[in-house]
């Protein structure tokens, strides 16, 4: 039985989430809180397996509550909040930096609640099985030896736990690395602008949502739009595709991005797969490795969910598994920048 604490100042939202969880025999609502302070108190008292929380609440907001919970009794936390403005979404992603596992959209229409009802139960089960406080390496490990090369594109793929890993990677990547970076992060529609804004603010890099026919600039970071595949076209511009069906349930798909470079110059590609559930990106990473690309994954110790990286390792798509900060150094060395 997975015990869940619901935190939201809206009685209606709490009631809907309560009914949603109650429809699953293995999920139980352990308690409900109307603000961040109540959430902290109930986490200490009830010791739930997972916390579902909003960000904007009275008395104590969700960000402060997440910080307190992770200090006092680390617990897997899922944020459910409204899309609202880009700045408010950036605040939601700040919750990831403070320890939240995932940010989910608070539905604004019945269809949205149906989608959440399909996704949330499995995410709650997954979160309950994860260590809330992941170990931090005290000292860097020896990086794999690799000869520097000309790198034209850096490709990144991520899902659950990805925003925090992407932030850590991009923040640690030396400014001297002026290679275009393409990112597929599984994300709900309406959240990609907030993620881009947050990553830009946190890392100082030019992070934006990708646009079709866009010409890539050195050092630019472009995110795949939600519900659209992102490809690199033969002329080096970006292709945003909303017509092709999802690949294994995902659009954008990491595999689609990775595979789009196979017909170009894969030997000049560095591809990295970060934390996430499932196997998206593992096959594409293997194909890139066989075509001469440099490949790597996030290691188990630092991954929120060691699904996609594990699949890639089991396929033999890479032998390099490191935390995000060390992956940044590995990529910098590959690009000929020691950082």
Image (cartoon, rainbow, N blue to C red):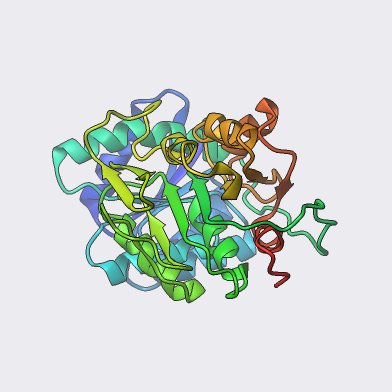
The answer to which of 57 and 180 lies nearer the viewer is: 180
| Left or right: 167, with 87 as reference point | right
Image point (48%, 68%), residue name: 219
Percent position (x, y) of residue 331? 65, 58
Percent position (x, y) of residue 47? 58, 48
**Which residue is most to the left?**
109
Q: How many marks?
A: 0
The answer to which of 303 and 21 lies nearer the viewer is: 303
| Left or right: 320, with 2 as reference point | right
Percent position (x, y) of residue 330? 71, 58
In the displayed structure, 336 sits above or below 187; it is below
| Left or right: 242, with 188 as reference point | left
Image point (57%, 75%), residue name: 175
**Which residue is most to the top?**
25
In the displayed structure, 273 sits above or below 117; it is below
| Left or right: 139, with 309 as reference point | right
The answer to which of 106 and 296 lies nearer the viewer is: 296
Q: Quadrant of the C terminus?
A: bottom right
The answer to which of 277 and 99 lies nearer the viewer is: 277
Image point (22%, 63%), residue name: 84
Q: Is residue 35 visible?
A: no
Percent position (x, y) of residue 227? 28, 41
To which quarter of the image does residue 71 belong? bottom right
């Amino acid at each position: 039985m997975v015990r869940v604490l619901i935190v939201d100042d809206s009685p209606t939202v709490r009631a809907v989430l309560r009914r949603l969880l109650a429809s699953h025999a293995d999920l139980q609502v352990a308690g409900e809180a109307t603000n961040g302070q109540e959430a902290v108190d109930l986490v200490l008292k009830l010791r739930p397996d997972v916390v579902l929380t909003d960000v904007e609440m009275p008395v104590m907001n969700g960000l402060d509550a997440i910080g307190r919970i992770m200090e006092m009794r680390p617990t897997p936390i899922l944020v459910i909040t409204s899309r609202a403005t880009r700045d408010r979404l950036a605040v939601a992603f700040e919750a990831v930096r403070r320890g939240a596992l995932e940010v989910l959209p608070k539905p604004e229409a019945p269809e949205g609640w149906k989608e959440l009802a399909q996704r949330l139960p499995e995410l709650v089960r997954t979160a309950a099985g994860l260590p809330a406080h992941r170990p931090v390496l005290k000292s860097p490990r020896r990086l794999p030896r690799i000869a520097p090369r000309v790198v034209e594109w850096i490709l990144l793929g991520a899902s659950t736990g990805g925003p925090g890993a992407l932030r850590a990677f991009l923040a640690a990547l030396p400014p001297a690395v002026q290679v275009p970076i393409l990112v597929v992060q599984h994300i709900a529609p309406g959240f990609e602008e907030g993620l881009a804004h947050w990553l830009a603010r946190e890392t100082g890099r030019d992070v934006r949502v990708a646009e079709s026919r866009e010409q890539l600039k050195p050092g630019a970071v472009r995110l795949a739009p939600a519900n659209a595949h992102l490809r690199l076209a033969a002329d080096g511009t970006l292709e945003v595709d909303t017509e092709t069906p999802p690949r294994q349930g995902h659009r954008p798909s990491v595999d689609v991005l990775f595979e789009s470079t196979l017909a170009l110059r894969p030997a000049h590609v560095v591809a990295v797969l970060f934390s996430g559930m499932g196997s998206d990106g593992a096959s594409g990473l293997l194909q890139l490795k066989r075509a001469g690309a440099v490949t790597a994954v996030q290691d188990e110790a630092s991954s929120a969910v060691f699904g996609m990286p594990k699949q890639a390792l089991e396929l033999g798509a890479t032998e390099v598994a490191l935390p995000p900060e060390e992956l940044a150094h590995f990529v910098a060395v590959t690009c000929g920048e020691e950082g």
